Amino acid sequence: MHQGQALRDLERAFKNFLNIPRCGFPKFKKKGRKDSFYLEGSIKITQGNYIQLPRIGVVKTYEILPSVPVKNVTISKRADSWYISFKYDFEPYPTQKQREIIGVDIGINTLATCSDGSKFANVKAYRKAKKQLVRHQRAVSKKVIGSKNRLKAVKKLAKVHKKVADIRADTLHKLTTWLAKNHSTIVIEDLNVSGMLKKRCDPATTPVARERAPRHHKLASAIADCGFYEFKRQLTYKCEWYGSELVIADRFYPSSQICSNCGHQQKMPLHLRTYVSAALR
């Protein structure tokens, strides 16, 4: 890593330690955990998928690189693959919209339900790969620490985790790109994702609460598998890219209890998804 970047990272780590309660004292970087390094200097993209790096030389990439000036790069490792990332100036461009406004409700069973009736299924990548992850994790635990067989088992486990993350990211990117490119105004709900993930039953409470604890644990796992926070993050910057407006409704606004035609408000249990006016019953 470049010495200047290492000092900047150290400064940021100490600032986080002093200002943010959850951040601990800075630790030395360890090999095998989030392997990455930073390079700056004479970096040049020579051809479509070739980039010249200092001290390393010319490296070929699987993807075509943009023909832009590059000042620094970060090379990181995920599972058994190496990735290169760099910053460059991107000019946002507004796109032609197909619809003025759309509301999006994200959930667990269906990842996104839009006001125009379109639905996007939740791929549930972690849930589908859970048995495979358990098998690989058990194989890692049985290997001797420091042995080559353990390193092989760890690599297999990391590849499965990478596949799960890639499937989730691909689904969210396709959904958020479609929303930002084709709609002028997008309305979503401001969900308390961190609070939903922390929702647990205290073991020292009543027996009923202890019985419900596994269900709450599974619910938090399902919420984490959806990527609600990542959905909001991607949609925020993509709306800026494509000239759309993102409206975030207050989390306490009773949107599901209000009729879209007359504005009448009534209580809606969680098992009901279709609003029926009281006058029609």
Image: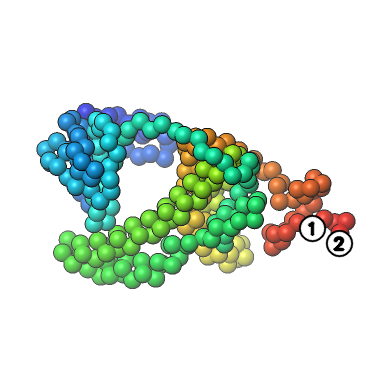
Q: Is residue 234 visible?
A: yes
Taking the spot 20% from the left edge, 62% from the top edge, the residue there is 151
Q: Which residue is mark 2?
A: 281
- For badge 2, the amino acid type reads Arg
Residue at horizontal 54%, vertical 39%? 96
Mark number, residue 43:
none
Residue 267 image offset from top left, x and y in percent:
77, 53
- Of the numbered discs 2 and 1, the one sitting upstream in the chain is 1
Q: Position of residue 102 (x, y in %)?
A: 63, 45
* Along the viewing direction, whichever of 88 and 205 lies nearer the viewer: 88
196 up-or-down from 132: above or below: above
In the picture, measured across the screen, residue 219 lies left or right of residue 278, that is left
x%, y% of residue 60?
A: 19, 47
- Dot 2 crowding, Cα within 10 Å, few <14, some 14–19, many 20+: few
Compared across the picture, whether 164 is left or right of 103 comes to left
| Residue 27 position by quadrant | top left
As rendered, which of 206 and 261 lies closer to the eye? Answer: 261
User: Decide: marks 2, 1 in contact (CB < 8 A)?
Assistant: yes
Which residue appears farthest toward the right when viewing the image? 279
Quadrant (top left/top right/bottom left/bottom right) for the C terminus: bottom right
Q: Name the residue at 21% across, 28% down.
A: 4
The answer for how far apart the CA atoms under marks 2 and 1 are is 8 Å
Q: Give the labeled residue for mark 1.
A: 276
Give coordinates of residue 127: x percent, y percent.
45, 65
Q: Amino acid at mark 1?
A: Val
